[in-house]
Structures are given as structure tokens and as C-alpha cells.
Image: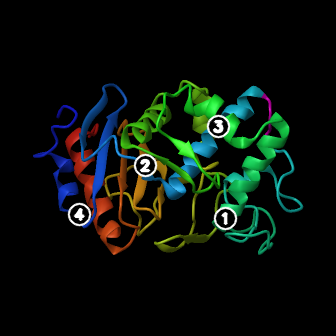
Amino acid sequence: MSSPHEAASGPLAAVSGWPAVATAGVISRGLGMVASTGPDERSYPWASVTKVLTALAVWVAVEEGTVGWDDPAGPPGSTLAHLLAHASGLAPDDDTELARPGTRRIYSNRGIELAAEHLAVQAGMPFEQYLRSGVIEPLGLAATTLSGSPASSASGPLRDLLALGQELLLPTLISAETLARTSTVAFAGLVGVLPGFGHQDPNDWGLGVEVRDHKHPHWTGSRNSPRTFGHFGQSGSFLWVDPTEELAVGSLADRPFGPWAVAAWPALSDAVIEAYGQG
């Protein structure tokens, strides 16, 4: 295996050819960081990868008993679990109710914001404060900040993103049982649109993270197992965790998501799994 920062001739070599200033890295369940490339100390916007950070804070709060999956939150009939799973029926960016809870998968930034607001009320502190004390500080994400929406406003360097990936491979803040529940499909069978990749039937989602399952097209690779979960962001960012391959891969860039990422990310994912996976 490559050592960190020695990926020039390995699967991460392709990153230098992307039409972006980008950084990427690989975490192995058993070995920690195995390879990285690019400026891993530079801070980049995470965009919707922020949702993974926010979700982890909610998972911690559930284990502490501060909130519960079945807490009423969002529109009538919706729970905290519905909000995290994009199954509340809320519109993408406001409080418009487009469907009854549990009937469609409608990707909703507003739903994630309401989940964070619910946690803040129950905890008696601003969400950012809970996130910092419950997740950012314990994981050592010293350079990561949340400057606005809990759905999209985190920024930080690759090293912090990969530390989050490591937590999702070998959890320390939550139990393995909680991770298993949150990273498997919630409200199975719902159809919807995966932003950037179109209609999916089903459009599987966990509790705050997207579940790959058998989606096509997709931003991960053809070698990724159906158990892969994570998120990508419109800022050109992604983080996926594949429990079967025992790998986490993250990338940050200075170019927004677009056709370049649709081509580059799956190819990178397949190359990483071929080099470092369990197969």
C-alpha cells in the first residue's frame, strides 16, 4: 500500500488531471490513512457533505437521550427520522409541504435544518455549540467550522474530512448498532431524484447519509458495494464509506460539481477499491 502523500503513481494520481485544484485521500479501516494527494491542509467548502457532520451530531444526541428518532419534527406527521431521511415531504429549501411524510424521497436542505433546530431546542443550546462539543472537538477537527446552515455551510481541510470518514468506519462517538441503523435504508422503497444524477427507483437513504444500494447512475464507482454510504456536495466535495471494502474516500475541490465530477469520481472510486479494497 502507498504511504500518505505518496500517491503520485497510485490510484489518486488521476486527481492531478482534474479540471480543479483538488485534494483526495483514502482511509482504511485497519490502517488509517493509506494515501493522499493535493493540499490536505487547505480549507475548502464542504457544501452538502456538511449533512454527514450534522447527522453524526444528531446520532450522538439520540444515544445520549437528548432527542429520539420518533420525536415529532417538521410538518404534521413527520418525525426526526423523516427529516434526516429526506422523507418528510418538505420542499428542498423552504417549508412547503410537497408530499405526506413517508411517501416520497424529496431531497430537502430545509429538513436537515429543522432536524438541527429540533436538537438545539432539546439540548438547550445553539446547534453549532452542540456540534462543536459533541463531534468536532472529540474528533479533533480543529480546522472545521460551521458558518451557517447545518445542511451546507461547513468548511475544513481534507485531514478533517478523512477523520470524519475514520469515525464512520470505526465509530468512537456512537455505538456500532447506531451506525448500522443510520447507514442502512430508512423508509424503504421511496422513489425520488438524486441531485445531479436524476430519478432513482428506489432512491435509498439512511438517517442523514445517502445509501448507494444499486443506484445507477451514481457518483461512486461500479466496484462500490451496495452498503456504501456518504454524501457529495455542490462545491466539488464528497465522502463515501464502504463497510464491505473497509475503506473511506474523501475529496475536496475548488470547482463546483458538474460533468467533470460525474466522470472523475466513479473512476477514482473504482481505482481506489481495486488498489486497496478487500476483493
Front-lying residue, 262 or 45 = 45
Write down the residue under mark 1: 108
Front-lying residue, 168 or 129 = 129
Q: Counting residues from the N terminus, which is met first, the one under dot 2 or under dot 4?
A: 4
Write down the residue under mark 3: 131
Q: Residues within 10 Å of mark 1 (few under 14, many from 20)?
A: many
Placement of 259 over or under 63, stated as above or below: below
Asked if residue 79 lies left or right of residue 241, the reply is right
The kind of secondary structure element at disc 4 is: loop
Write down the residue under mark 4: 18
Q: Amino acid at mark 1?
A: Ser
Q: Quarter-wise, where is residue 89 in the image?
A: bottom right
Q: CA distance from mark 4 to mark 3?
A: 33 Å
Residue 131 is situated, as x and y percent measured from the top left of the image, at: 65, 37
Q: Residue at x 34, y 25 (%)?
A: 30
Q: CA distance from mark 4 to mark 1?
A: 29 Å
The kind of secondary structure element at disc 3 is: helix
Residue 279 is situated, as x and y percent measured from the top left of the image, at: 26, 40
Q: Amino acid at mark 3?
A: Leu
Asked if residue 29 lies left or right of residue 53, the reply is left
> Magenta segment range?
65-69
Number of the label disc, if any, that sits on residue 239: 2
Q: Are marks 3 and 1 in contact (CB under 8 Å)?
A: no
